[in-house]
Structure formats: structure tokens, C-alpha cells
Amino acid sequence: MFEIATLSYTNPESPAAFAHSLHETGFAVLTDHPIGPERMASAYASWAAFFGDEAKQDWAVKDGAQDGFFPFRSENAKDSAVKDLKEFYHVFPKGRVPPELEEETRALHADLVEVGATLLSWLQAHSPADVTARLSEPFPDMIAGSESNLLRILHYPPLAKAPEPGAVRAAAHGDINLVTCLLAGTEAGLEAKDTGGEWHAVPCDPGMMAINAGDMLDMASGGYYPATVHRVVNPPQGRNVARLSMPMFLHPRPEVTLKPDMTAGDFLTERLREIGLKS
């Protein structure tokens, strides 16, 4: 049975239950975490104003950089020929952020990295010995001092017309990184796929945070924590409104070894080329 656990961040029993849910489903959902619903709503309102202003083009990525604004239909899922129906902004520790958004966004980035480090420590403490023995360093140490930790602010605009076949807000994919801390979106639409090929809605009540394993965690753990495929479906008829979400992708430092023949930096470069974000 595919059942994503919903856990309180403050419950002393949650660390073990979190590791179990990530092992069984690749996902878990947190409540009572440090980023409260009011703070999430404020951040979404601030970034909605950014995406609604054509001045966003002044922050467009250039010269192969990864920080800044990516226009509508910049990215495709791995092995998909159709671009996703979204635009987004990348915030790295040393990347550019519009001045009016900087204070709020930098604080959010720092706090999400701290939450992610805590969750990785939970996995370290509650993984089988054969999993921890294969690691080049403990899970939380992998992201310590990483300049690759990425906060992505996603904007899925209302659909002006019926999209072509196969075009969705985010096609089925697995994340690249170790773990993703996803603040609940402003609308529903996130779904996860079980091993039988069935899709399940991921809980997204206001204030929740969905956590999922990425390909790097899957690789480093020898498959113990699966990078579950997920997607964001188009809005239903009668609910054609914008959707925003904010995932924090926790990335190891580039030199961290995920398996004997693969570093985090090499794997990231390979995947960015596959999804159209790097030439």
C-alpha cells in the first residue's frame, strides 16, 4: 500500500517514521515545521508580484549561469520532448536576488537548509548499517557549506489555451538532489507514482511541507531511499488559476562521492544537460 506519512516535525517519534516513509514511498509530509503558514503566504505573495511584472526579464539567466529567472517553458523533464508549463527563479547562497525580495528570501533559504540538515540527520540515525557504511560521509555532512543548495520559486501561470498533447505543468520526473523540502503549493496538483504505476495526490494543506528523496540520495543509499517519480498536473476545468510552489533542493558539495565512479558535481552536470538547463 502506498501511503505517504504525515508527521509532526516536533514529535520525538517522527525521525524514525520519516526514514521509514522515505524508504517505503520516497516521500513524507511534515507539519509543525519552522516555516509557518503565515510566512509561506507572505513569501508567495511577494514572488507572485515578481512574476506578474515584466521587469522579471531583467533577471533572466545568461551566459550559462544557473541563478536568476528562467522564462516560461525553459525546462523539460528527463526524456521528455515537451517543455513544462512553468517559469521559475533560482536562488543560490551566492546568487542574485531582486533587492525587494532579498531579505525575506535569504532568510527562507537559510531556514530551509537548516530543516534539510535536520532531516538528513534523521536519515543518518535511522538507516540500516549497510546503508550508512557505503556513504563517503554522513548524509548531513554532504550539504555542509554547499553553495549548490537551491531554492526554486516556481510559477505555473493560468493556461491561456488548451496545451498541446503531453504538455503539463511539470512532467513526470525524479529530482536530482539528495532531498527536496517543498513548501505546500498555493494550489493542489502534485502527484507521486507508486511502483505499480498508479498516481497519488500528495497532501498540500496550507503550512505543510512535502519531503522527497532525489536521485543523489537514491544513488548514495544504494536504492534504499527511492527517488519516487512525481509530477504536477494541469488544473481541472473551472480552476484555471496560477499555482506557486517553493522547493528547496538540498545538494551535496560538488566533490562529494555518491558512488565510486560518480561525484555530485558530475551527476548534476549530466542531469542539467538532460533537462535542457545546461548546454
Image (spheres, helix red, strand yellow):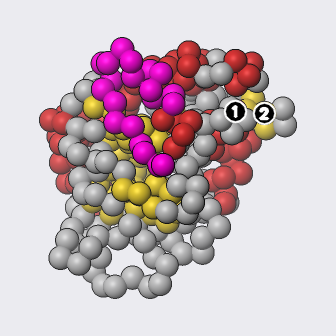
Q: Is residue 91 above or below residue 117?
A: below
Which picture quadrant has residue 100?
A: top left
The reply to whether the C-beta atoms of the residues labelled 1 and 2 are less than 8 Å apart is yes
Magenta stretch containing residue 87, yes or no? no
Residue projecting furthest to the right: 261
Taking the view exactly as shown, the residue that stands out farthest to the front is 1
Where is residue 40 shown, x and y percent of the image? 22, 39
| Residues rendered magenta in the picture | 1-20
Circle 2 residue: 259
Q: Nearer the viewer, residue 229 or 1?
A: 1
Name which residue lies at 43% across and 71% down.
168
Q: CA distance from mark 1 to mark 2?
A: 6 Å
Q: Position of residue 212 (x, y in %)?
A: 48, 41
**Residue 243, label in figure:** none
In the rendered structure, the answer to whether residue 207 lies left or right of residue 14 reads left
* Residue 106: image location, x then y, percent: 34, 30
Please state, as top left, top right, bottom left or bottom right, where the C terminus lies in the image: bottom right
Asked if residue 70 shows in the view, the reply is: no
Q: Nearer the viewer, residue 52 or 114?
A: 114
Question: How packed is label 2: few (under 14 Cα within 10 Å), some, or many (20 or more)?
Answer: some
Q: Residue at x 56, y 15 (%)?
A: 125
Residue 130 appears in which quarter of the rendering? top right
Residue on which the image places disc 1? 220
Magenta span has 15?
Answer: yes
The amino acid on which the numbered mark 2 sits, given as a three-letter code, is Lys
- Observer able to see residue 244: yes
Q: Secondary structure at mark 1?
A: helix
Amino acid residing under circle 1 = Ala
Local crowd at mark 1 within 10 Å, few (<14), some, or many (≥20)? many
Q: In the depicted view, which residue is nearer to us: 29 or 173?
A: 29
